[in-house]
Image (cartoon, rainbow, N blue to C red):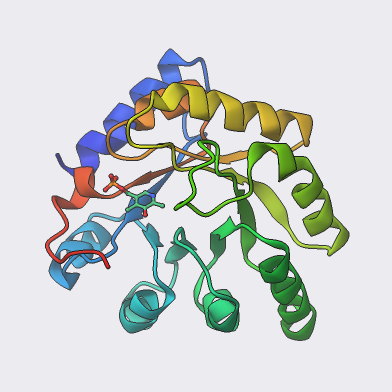
Amino acid sequence: MSLQEIIARIAKAEAAAGRPKGSVRLIAVSKVQPNDRVEAVLKQGHRCFGENRVQEAAGKWPAFRESYPDIDLHLIGPLQTNKARQAMELCNAIHSVDRPKLAKTLARLAQEVGQCPDLFIQVNTGEEAQKAGVIPAEADDFVAECRSLDLPVRGLMCIPPVDEEPALHFALLAKIAVRNGLDGLSMGMSSDFETAIALGATHVRVGSAIFGDRVKPEE
Ligand SMILES: *Cc1c(COP(=O)(O)O)cnc(C)c1O
């Protein structure tokens, strides 16, 4: 699969869902991909990327930004509070706001720095013990708490359980977003981004379908 094919499939899914062209943003997930593959995608003109570890992002993106200053970098993996400052300096958006302690830290840093990346609240729609995110029943309260901290909450994010029908989880996330007046929906990956677009995704996070299989293991 190539970047151009994925872009074409996104356009087709937007049209099929009766959504405006360009309403879905493609985040090319470049975690653990070799730099030459990332550079190839940059050379084709794509600028929006996702990483799931702050450390890895810090080692990779400042150099790319020197050549491509308009890069739009999204952190999509779990964020420890002690890495929050670095994440805020490095990233344009954070998709993994998942607990009050992190929200408070981001709020304090945002006051200090005078700016904050766009934030997405991660919802653990499958209520899986090993997965980050607030459970659906606590999502409304957590959205309200983030807003009371003046955080720029743009939307919600989820990662459905691997063995379940993703559409159910996308629909649940969309429902929680609507009742909270949020229009950003970060959902859909290589195997299910068209389903996610049909259910309202505004940001799809696609890795292996663009870059090929990840060559190094994820920890
Ligand atoms: C790795 C990752 C993706 C991309 O997964 P693919 O299946 O390679 O498209 C999307 N979202 C998150 C949170 C990820 O960690």
Q: In this rendering, would 87 be left or right of 165? A: right
User: Residue 8, percent across and down?
Assistant: 28, 30
Q: In this orientation, which residue lies closer to the viewer: 165 or 114?
A: 165
How many circles with numbers are drawn on the protein?
Answer: 0
Q: Does the image show residue 216?
A: yes
24 in relation to 66, above or below: above
Give the quarter of the image for residue 164: top left
Q: What quarter of the picture does the N terminus occupy?
A: top left
If the image is split into quadrants, where does the C terminus sit? bottom left
User: Where residue 159 sits: x, y (%)?
Assistant: 45, 42
- As rendered, which of 68 and 212 lies closer to the eye? 212
> Could you tell me which residue is drawn at 56 percent across and 61 percent down?
93
Quarter of the view holding residue 50: bottom left
| Residue name at image x 76 percent, y 51 percent | 142
| Residue 183 seen in the figure | no
Q: Is residue 139 left or right of residue 201?
A: right
Give the vertical position of 102 relative to 166 (above or below): below
Q: Is residue 17 left or right of residue 151?
A: left
Location of residue 40 in the rendering, given as x and y in whole percent from the top left corner: 17, 61
Q: Residue at x 71, y 43 (%)?
A: 139
- Residue at left 22%, top 61%? 43
Name, please, the residue furthest toward the right. 148
Picture coordinates of residue 133, whole percent (x, y) = 57, 51
Q: Image height check: is 200 above or below 30?
A: above
Q: Which one is in front, 104 or 112? A: 104
The residue furthest front is: 129
